[in-house]
Amino acid sequence: MQPHPLIDLAINSLVTFFVIIDPIGLIGIFNGLAVPLSGRDRRRLAIRGTLVGSAVLLLFALAGERLLAALGISLPAFRAAGGTLLLLLAIEMIFQKRIQRRNEEAQDVSDEHHVEDLAIFPLGIPLIAGPGAITSALLLTSRYKGDYLEQGIVLGAMLIVLAITMATFLASERLGKLIGNTVAGVATRLLGILLAAVAVEYIVVGVRQIWNSTH
């Protein structure tokens, strides 16, 4: 029996955002950022960082297509380019380069202990609302342009993943001890394979649309 299209959309959107934001892979990085902070400040950092990332992703999900139009960039071209970017991110995840890069970004501000600053950079941007997440938010909502129910499902899936991300941050000390680097590494590689499949689909659809519009 075929799943209902809306259920299929909800599952696909959840998987896409979960893979790209990668809450599991962010646990260790969040713990590194929060080392000098008190329990209260850790909670503030988790909440504010997630809110900053959510605001950026919602902005691009709701107004990203208008921004592309203002810049003279077609959606098919952005879809093909975005798929290429996601494929590169997937390769990073599979070969464990993404966590290394994120750690380096976090270490660049390791001496900055101000919660508000850390919540904006690097936690909110680019660790949560990075290029891959922004691209996916824009492409998924633009795919269902004019259908508010389907767009609402995409946005709902994105917000659910962001809520999961906040929850993992709030429980990061316990989860860090429970999961460990090995399990997190295996999970990141598996998620990278899924992301590669999503990326290839974006590239194929984008290239096909460009081809059809020029022939």
Image (cartoon, rainbow, N blue to C red):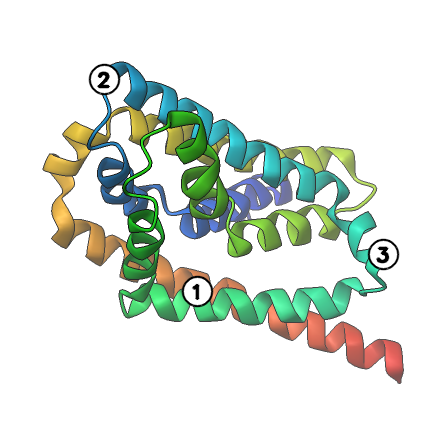
Q: Are marks 1 and 2 in contact (CB under 8 Å)?
A: no
Type of residue at label 2?
Gly
Q: Position of residue 209 (x, y in %)?
A: 77, 72
Name above or below for residue 175 compared with residue 140. above
Which callout, 1 or 3, points at the residue further toward the start of the chain? 3
Nearest the eye: 127 or 180: 127
Q: Is residue 157 left or right of residue 75?
A: left
Q: Position of residue 26 (x, y in %)?
A: 31, 44
Under tag 1, what secondary structure? helix
Task: Choose mark 1 or mark 2, whichever is in front.
Answer: 2
Which quadrant holds residue 119?
top left
Type of residue at label 1?
Leu
Which callout, 3 or 2, points at the residue further toward the start of the chain? 2
Which quadrant holds residue 59?
top right
- Residue designated by label 1: 89
Q: Are marks 1 and 3 in contact (CB under 8 Å)?
A: no
Nearest the eye: 100 or 41: 41
Name above or below for residue 159 compared with residue 90. above
- Residue designated by label 2: 39
Q: CA distance from mark 3 to mark 2?
A: 45 Å
Rendered image: mark on residue 69: 3
Q: Is residue 129 left or right of residue 109?
A: right
For label 3, count other residues whose C-alpha is less than 10 Å away and answer few (under 14), some (14-19) or many (20+).
Answer: few
For label 2, count other residues whose C-alpha is less than 10 Å away and answer few (under 14), some (14-19) or many (20+).
Answer: few
For label 1, count other residues whose C-alpha is less than 10 Å away and answer few (under 14), some (14-19) or many (20+).
Answer: many
Which callout, 1 or 2, points at the residue further toward the start of the chain? 2
Q: Quadrant of the C terminus?
A: bottom right
Type of residue at label 3?
Ala
